[in-house]
Image (cartoon, rainbow, N blue to C red):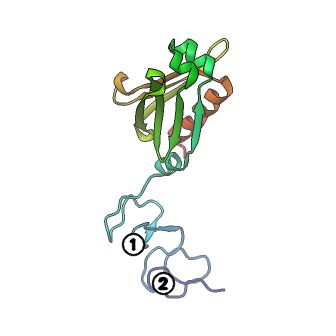
Amino acid sequence: MPQTCPHCGGSLADGHKYCQHCGRRALEFKLCPKCDEPLSDRAASCPSCGQRLPSEKEAASQALQMEVRSTHLGAFFAGGSITGLLLPPIIRVSRGHITVTKWTFLGLRTHNQEIQVSRVASVRYTKGIIWGGLLVETFGGAADDLSEKGLRQHDARMMAEQLKSCLRDEL
C-alpha cells in the first residue's frame, strides 16, 4: 500500500523520508496534541500553534502512577505520634507530581506536601533494620525536599527505582 505525505497528501516513494512534492519530512514525525500538525520527532514546540511539546523525560514522569503507604508501626516509630499509628502517611506519584499526605490531630487535619517530578534532583532509598525510607531532593533546596520513613523496604526501593528511571537522561 503506498504511503501518503501527512503534510500535502502526495504519494511517497518507498523508503524516502522526505516528500518529493512539498519537501517536508514525511516519516518519523509526531502530531501536535493541540492542532494535530505533523512535527519532527525533535521538535520542542509546534510552529503552527506554539504548543510546547513534552520531552521524553516529562512524558515518562506524567505516565508514572504509584502509591506507597507507610506501615502503621513504622509511621509510629519514625514519626513518634499516635496519629501515625492510626493513619500512616501516603506517598503518591501521579500526573507528574509527588504528594505526601500526613494526618495530624488524630486525623482531623491533613497536611499535603507536593513537588513536581521535573524539579527532582535526586532520589535515595534508605535502608533501615526493619523499615525503609525515601528521600527526594529537589533543585529548589532543602525546604522542598521530601523525606519519609517507616515504609516497607520493598515499596521504598521500588518507588525510588521508578522515580530514578524518570530522572535518567538516556530516555
Residue 63 appears at what percent x and percent y?
A: 54, 50
**Helix or strand or loop: what does disc 2 sit on?**
loop
**Helix or strand or loop: what does disc 1 sit on?**
loop
Quadrant assignment, res 3: bottom right
**Left-right relation of 51 to 8:** left
Question: Who's the residue at 55% across and 35% down the image?
Answer: 164
Question: Who's the residue at 50% across and 68% down the image?
Answer: 29
Look at the image and tell me whether residue 87 can be seen: yes
Q: Nearer the viewer, mark 1 or mark 2?
A: 1
Q: Quadrant of the N terminus?
A: bottom right
Note whether 120 is above or below 132 in the view shown.
below
Residue 144 appears at what percent x and percent y?
A: 37, 27
Note whether 156 is above or below 2 in the view shown.
above
Question: Who's the residue at 36% across and 61% down the image?
Answer: 45
Mark 1 and mark 2: Cα distance apart in space = 24 Å
Q: Nearer the viewer, residue 97 or 137?
A: 97
User: What's the residue type where badge 1 is placed?
Assistant: Cys
Note whether 77 is above or below 101 in the view shown.
above
Look at the image and tell me whether residue 168 can be seen: no
Quadrant assignment, res 27: bottom right
Res 134 label: none
Residue where numbered disc 2 is placed: 20
Question: Who's the residue at 49% across and 81% down the image?
Answer: 19
Res 35 label: 1
Residue 132 appears at what percent x and percent y?
A: 61, 20
The 10 Å Cα crowd at callout 2, few under 14, some 14 to 19, many 20 or more, is some
Residue 125 appears at what percent x and percent y?
A: 58, 23
Mark 2 or mark 1, which is nearer the start of the sequence? 2
Note whether 61 is above or below 36 in the view shown.
above
User: What's the residue type where badge 2 is placed?
Assistant: Gln
The 10 Å Cα crowd at callout 1, few under 14, some 14 to 19, many 20 or more, is few
